[in-house]
Image: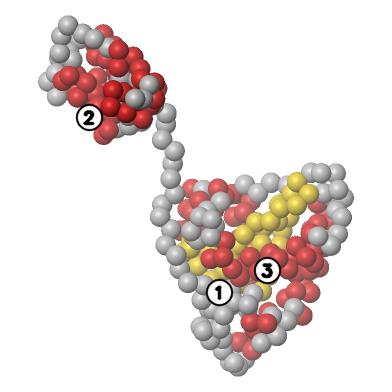
């Protein structure tokens, strides 16, 4: 590569993930077998260190001198490898369908804004996808997973337990404690694909209305004022907000019709 492509030694080593010391390394004995074994170990267990590799190699019957193996390990630059970053499991795209009754699917999301002092706060929103009812619009300065679970529990105590909850891949939602809670309660978590907020379109549309009517409409001096305005908005929204996709009816009207067995929602009804 250096001779044929005219690259510098530094550039060539970078492209093939080889340390410069390895390029210049010369020995009077053949260390290729040691290198092959270290390479094999690093590919099998990339996050392990020298001791792990060395004793696994010894267990395979290769009784090489420790100092010799360590020297080659360092020359190969294996000690410079960084811990691999955790990756999210693959998320499967699911269509945003209109549920046919309450408690089939809830959607949850966070919003953020700041007080007049500049202090940031977040708002945790939950809606029922069936009638777009606002089940939670709670503000707080911090939203650790345990607090999110508390707000979710409050909504469940009031409205009942959903079969499924649609969320993004935020740290609160992928945390072990949140996942464990949902598993215990029998709630399926439907994660949207990263960077695809439109897959959580019902709550995203709700967020837009909430921002227009609350966050952008008022100046807040403290978190209590945010809470009061949020609760006032939620009550008015559920009682009176006319949804175009719900035949200009409010969430409460849709729920009342469902309770009376009137005009059930159709799956083909779309988000608008």
Identify the residue shown where x is 38% and y is 21%: 8
How packed is label 2: few (under 14 Cα within 10 Å), some, or many (20 or more)?
A: some
Labels 3 & 1 near each other (Cβ < 8 A): no
Residue toward you, 262 or 116: 116
Q: In the rendering, at what x and y percent does residue 91 appear?
A: 43, 58
How many angstroms separate mark 3 from mark 1 (CA)? 17 Å
Asked if residue 185 shows in the view, the reply is no
| Image-quadrant location for residue 243 | bottom right
Q: Residues within 10 Å of mark 1 (few under 14, many from 20)?
A: some
Q: Residue at x 21, y 8 (%)?
A: 27
Observer-nearest of 78 and 207? 78
How many numbered discs? Answer: 3
Which residue corresponds to mark 3? 206
Q: Which residue is mark 2?
A: 40
Viewer-side residue, 127 vs 266 = 266
Q: Quadrant of the N terminus?
A: top left
**Label located before the other in sequence (3 or 2):** 2
Secondary structure of the residue carrying numbered label 3 = helix
Q: Which label is found at residue 81?
A: none
Return the x and y of residue 172 as percentages of the image width and height.
57, 50
Q: In terms of depth relative to the viewer, which is nearer, 121 or 36?
A: 36
Tell me which numbered mark, 3 or 1, is placed earlier along the sequence.
1
Scheme by which the image is coloured: secondary structure
- SS at badge 2: helix
Residue 256 at x, y = what percent?
66, 86
When asked about the image quadrant of residue 126, the answer is: bottom right
- Label 1: which residue? 103
Label 1's element? loop
Is residue 187 shown above or below 77?
below
Front of the two marks 3 and 1: 3
Image quarter where the C terminus lies is bottom right
Q: CA distance from mark 1 to mark 2?
A: 52 Å
């Amino acid at each position: 590569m250096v001779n044929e492509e005219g690259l510098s030694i530094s550039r060539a080593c970078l492209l093939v993930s080889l340390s410069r010391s390895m390029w210049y390394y010369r020995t009077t004995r053949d260390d290729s077998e040691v290198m092959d074994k270290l390479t094999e170990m690093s590919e099998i267990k990339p996050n392990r260190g020298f001791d792990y590799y060395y004793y696994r190699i010894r267990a395979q019957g290769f009784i090489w001198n420790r100092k010799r193996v360590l020297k080659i390990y360092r020359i190969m630059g294996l000690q410079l490898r960084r811990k691999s970053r955790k990756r999210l499991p693959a998320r499967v795209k699911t269509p945003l369908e209109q549920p046919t009754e309450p408690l089939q699917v809830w959607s949850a999301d966070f919003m953020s804004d700041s007080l007049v002092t500049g202090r940031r706060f977040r708002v945790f929103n939950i809606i029922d996808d069936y009638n777009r009812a606002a089940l939670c619009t709670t503000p707080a300065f911090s939203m650790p997973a345990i607090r999110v679970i508390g707000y979710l529990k409050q909504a469940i105590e009031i409205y009942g337990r959903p079969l499924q909850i649609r969320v993004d891949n935020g740290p609160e939602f992928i945390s072990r404690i949140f996942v464990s809670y949902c598993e215990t309660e029998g709630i399926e978590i439907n994660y949207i694909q990263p960077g695809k907020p439109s897959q959580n379109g019902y709550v995203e549309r709700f967020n837009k209305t909430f921002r227009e009517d609350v966050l952008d409409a008022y100046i807040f001096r403290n978190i209590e004022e945010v809470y009061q305005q949020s609760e006032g908005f939620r009550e008015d929204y559920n009682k009176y907000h006319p949804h175009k996709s719900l035949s200009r009816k409010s969430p409460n009207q849709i729920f009342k019709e469902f309770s009376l067995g009137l005009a059930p929602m159709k799956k083909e009804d779309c988000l608008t």
